[in-house]
Image (cartoon, rainbow, N blue to C red):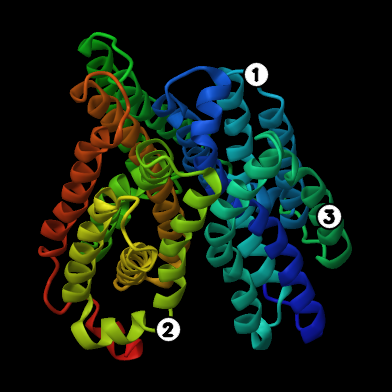
Amino acid sequence: MSAPSSPSPLRSRLTSIAVAGGLLMEFIDSTSLATALPTLSREFGIPPEELKLALTTYVLALAMFIPASGWLSDRFGARRVYMIAIGIFMAGSLACALSANLAMLVAARFLQGLGGALMLPVARTIIVRSTPRENLVSAMAWFTIPGLLGPLIGPPLSGFILSIANWHWIFLINLPVSVLAIVAIRLLVPETAEDRNIRTFDMQGFVLTASAMILFIGAIELSGVGLPLYFSIGAVAGALLLMAGYIRHALRRERPVLNLQLFRYTTFRLSMIAGTVVRLGFGAGPLLMPLYFQIGLGWSPLAAGGIIIGHSIGVILAKPFAPRVIGWLGFRNALIACNLAASVAAFFPYLFSNATPLLLMYAVLITGGLSRSMQFTANNSLAYSELDDAEVSDAATMASVLQQLGLAMGVSLGGLLIHLGRETSGGALTASSFLMPFAAVSILMAAASLIYMRLPRDAGEAMRGAAA
């Protein structure tokens, strides 16, 4: 479907703002819960590392349902699906606020994740289809704002809410915002046509991949709850069998839910593998840092949320410089250097104490955000360097799924490492309990540089000139 030419620049801008408003709510929510984990730990009477399930489940739902979002928006209309997605997210937020125990919170977070999985890809579709090509750059600029501001606002907002009210309001604040977002979408976003002749959705592939993801995450979760090792081994074996079944299915189907043929491209394959390894470490960060600052150093939720935004500041500051760094060093060298810098910065928060100057803490976290942002900019760009235009949509879906799956596994891994750290420090969660988790995350992230070293020295050379 071609982009319409009739909407004015003002109308296109209002459409972008309306769509971005819903995304901003999602990004704020996804980064605010981690600050509240110690509070929820006391409220539910459970160890704080067990609350990783509330983080993992949300990201897992994103990974599971993102592949269905494109088909749903084509079949039922992007505006309708986006409003339904916000409604699902709102229902999940209410259920989170009403949760009386971890099981209820985990189920509610899964519902939130289902809504979130539909929001981001469908929002991009709305922007592209409802905006004239001459206004698309401006519209996409508004579209990227939530991803930058959400992580910046979420942690301190959560800390502020906890300082003046109870934890339920972290979720209840989403209700009026959701209603306003739905009304704005209804009034400002043009309706998109349904396509009743769209291809049949690959339900078999969807079930196989979603089930494999659940078992992979379950294997990590089971290893940290004291069950015999064979439970985790069984979960991994089941996941591998399901993935083998999906590979067999995907090679026979013309349009599988996830296109495995993309991995024949060296740059795509190595970018996806290395990016997933890095996100295993990166995903543990939202669990490790709030717990370390509040439990290890005794900070308040507001203070912890305020310092964590240093990383998000670094991410934003890196945006103008990333193309220049890539143009100067080349993709391969930029990826190796930025990954090693981010790996070192990932360990440094453990060295913080109550005597560490605040400016030094911010400098470390900003440096980590800078290097990680440049790394992901290079990684995500290089992944598309060898692809045909017809393969870009499938590649974007695959990249989104692997990104969320890596983050979900990272959160689970972080919880397991905290559990092991607790055991090595006598059963009590103290500052020393976090040494092994921070060190393991740093080493894991650094290992991705070995994968980047396998890239050809001229990888992405055609894009390098444009980057500079």
Quarter in which the N terminus is drawn: bottom right
Circle 3 sits in a helix, a strand or a loop, which is it? helix
Q: Nearer the viewer, mark 3 or mark 1?
A: 1
Q: Nearer the viewer, mark 2 or mark 1?
A: 1
Answer with left or right where residue 466 lies relative to residue 17. left
The quarter of the displayed image where residue 18 is located: bottom right
Q: Are marks 2 and 1 in contact (CB under 8 Å)?
A: no
Measuring from the top left, give residue 404's x and y in whole percent.
Answer: 43, 46
- Residue 248 shows in this picture: no
Q: In the image, what residue occupies the spot 63% across and 28% down?
A: 108
Residue holding disc 1: 100
Which of marks 3 and 2 precedes in the sequence? 3
Quarter in which the C terminus is drawn: bottom left
Residue furthest top in the image: 228
What amino acid is at disc 3? Leu
Residue holding disc 3: 180
Q: CA distance from mark 2 to mark 3?
A: 33 Å
Residue holding disc 2: 320
Measuring from the top left, give residue 82's x and y in whole percent.
Answer: 72, 52
Answer with left or right where residue 235 lies relative to residue 399. left
What amino acid is at disc 2? Pro
Answer with left or right where residue 12 lies relative to residue 137. right
What amino acid is at disc 1? Ala
Looking at this view, is 197 or 256 the one in front? 256
Circle 1 sits in a helix, a strand or a loop, which is it? loop
Q: CA distance from mark 3 to mark 1?
A: 28 Å
Looking at this view, is 214 or 337 the one in front? 337
The quarter of the displayed image where residue 330 is located: bottom left
Would you place residue 59 above or below residue 376 in this image? above
Other-residue count near label 3 (Cα within 10 Å), few / some / many at <14 / 14–19 / ≥20: some
Which of marks 1 and 2 precedes in the sequence? 1
Circle 2 sits in a helix, a strand or a loop, which is it? loop
